[in-house]
Image (tube, rainbow, N blue to C red):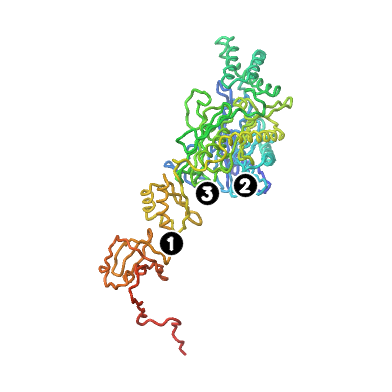
Amino acid sequence: MEEKKLYNAVQKTITLADGRQIMIETGKLAKQADGSVVVKMGDTMLLGTVVAAKDAKEGTDFMPLQVEYKEKFASCGRFPGGFMKREGKASDAEVLVARLIDRALRPLFPADYHAEVFVTVNLISADKDIQPDALAGLAASAALAVSDIPFGGPISEVRVARIGGEFVINPNSSQMDDADLDIMVGGTIDNILMVEGEMKEVSEEVMLNAIKFAHEEIKKQCAVQIELSKELGKDVKRTYCHETNDEELRQTVIKELYDKAYAIATSGTTKHERTDAFDALEAEFASRYSEEELVEKAPLIHKYYHDDVVKKAMRNMILDEGKRLDGRRTDEIRPIWCEVGYLPGAHGSAIFTRGETQSLTTVTLGTKLDEKMIDEVLVQGSEKFVLHYNFPPFSTGEARPARGVSRREIGHGHLAWRALKPMIPTGEEMPYALRVVSDILESNGSSSMATVCAGTLALMDAGVKIKKPVSGIAMGLISDSATGRWAVLSDILGDEDHLGDMDFKVTGTRDGITATQMDIKVDGLSYEVLAKALEQARVGRMYILGKLTECIAEPRADYRPFVPRIVQITIPKDFIGAVIGPGGKVIQDIQKTTNTTITITENDEAGVVDIFGVDKAALDGALERIKAIVAVPEVGEVYDGKIKSIVSFGAFVEILPGKEALLHISEIDYKRFETMEETGLHEGDMIKVKLIGVDAKTNKYKLSHKALLPKPEGWVERERKPREGSKPHGDRREPRRK
């Protein structure tokens, strides 16, 4: 009897340019999901699943997509930290990968599809040299490709890095130390959808070429998914009906409200004035219907008014007149004002205001103990520089409670962190841990870029010797596929982001780009448009940099008086134990008596000691004690020693902290003593001694007090007789017997 096969796995292979392979397998795991795949590269395996509700919930008029990315600690043979010893809340790193997937998938679901969709990608096996985030987008898209869920993909995401001047797709972790460009690119077989990453001051041309290079690989990965979908018969998707439309009502809304909305759009009013005017126009139109009629018609009126009136009025105004909602030209930056040192109690602070967007940013300097500890599946260690971005509801005038840190806040903060990170000094130049916090007090577009600008100002105000100032700008796009017209917008408003086709954030110094984030909502965006956006962004960045340096041209010469100070010294590796002491007694005593905080980091060659003190006196006191511990006694040097113990043949004297040496009874004075009682020395007495030698066999130090005394008149050094039975120096071998 033939054994029945319990599953039917189908596999496809993607071969990268360097010969490495990515395998996609379906039909083996998680078969009750609408779609599931395993994506494998080396020993790294990702399980991607997708499940969609059969129908949309009543009243839903948006795409309720939820994306989760989770790294399992068992994937690389590790226990989770914490008391519970299980995976819990998503880490910042997991949230950031989930956002990368979400931003590429979301624009491709049909506009009228409103069923809940849950995409989950789990790292189930990890290869420490393969970066799983570069495969997560592929896993999510492949799961959709083998399902019957309506989706305009497939998509894929790849990492492209420039190493040694050459672009590399999905490089290994070990290669990244030498990269000067690291970006994630997501796209379909035809278009780029998403870009995010960091760079070490590269040019706009380099970045554009990197995107093009990535897209060639994306095309190959999308083609394999299309092939897989057809092979499984999943190229035909489920039917659905999640919207009921009233074309007559749509045309009435357009006819009666478009011109009025266009007039509001061109009035050049503020955000809230404009919003109130738009809302009043909609309310006026809706008032002609009874409450019973509005139960059915109100959602449709709102939808048609937003999509076919307000959105089109704003877009046409820009394309027809080159005029924006606030009256600016397409390449014009909003008015900027900034101020440093606004908060007297902070180590560094700045206000950056651009139009109706405002960031109040602070900088705090701390010790090594304040560094962010990282305990992720594939990454462990610490981070000296952290940046937190807060977006409270009042910044947009919303009356709602703040409910913890959102994914958006994590994402925007990470982008700003990436922008500033290459300019933060390292090593001895920056012994402090750094925390930058941006609180958005007003928001009308580009708040993450305001964070970058305010962060630059606050760091310089704190006296942090950043390498170069960094500015950021958000670019937008309005396009019309029917006519081929398009316009790139500098420094976009919130409405221009919401109603436009692109949100392209670029940060950098005068010498190049440091970070970017781009989301595109329209098909067929040409590289000509991207090149125009990058060049316009460069001009805008330079203008904003000028405003920043007008406020503060360079970092302050010194930290503020109340900033605790850090001194960093390097000690021989062998002395680390002596500084710490048994059970930490020595270092704890130094910290307690000098009111300092001391940390020691061991590297391959030495120990790095950071001393953190409230003032110079405290630092000097701790520094003196540590230097004394690591000091090496030198023959011929004179020391003020303390007698630690008395023995019959002499005294043990502490000449340096933790270093004792013997003062023999014969080296106390020119006078001969028979007993130590005759010397008059006691434990605790201070005595000046000279280091006269080191025993070659025992490596013990020999001291003399006598050597510091004047020789008595007529003193003759006694000749030392050889010990009885000892042989003369030279060849002591017995003569060979014949």
Q: Which residue is identified by label 1?
A: 632
Label drawn at residue 427: 3
Q: Which residue is identified by label 2?
A: 179
Q: Residue 291 location, x and y as percent?
A: 55, 10
Residue at disc 1, secondary structure: loop
Eye-nearest disc, 1 or 3: 1
The amino acid at mark 2 is: Ala
Query: How would you rate the neighbour count of disc 3 (Cα within 10 Å): few for under 14, some for 14-19, many for 20 or more?
Result: few
Between 150 and 572, the residue placed more toward the observer is: 572
Residue at disc 3, secondary structure: helix
How far apart marks 1 and 3 lie (CA) works out to 26 Å
Eye-nearest disc, 3 or 2: 3
Between 406 and 730, the residue placed more toward the observer is: 730
How far apart marks 3 and 2 lie (CA) works out to 20 Å
Tell me if I can see residue 145 in this picture. no
Q: Residue 332 location, x and y as percent?
A: 65, 28
Farthest-out residue, bottom? 738
First along the sequence among labels 3 and 2: 2
Say which residue appears at 43% left-offset and 81% top-offset.
729
Q: Residue 106 location, x and y as percent?
A: 61, 31
First along the sequence among labels 2 and 1: 2
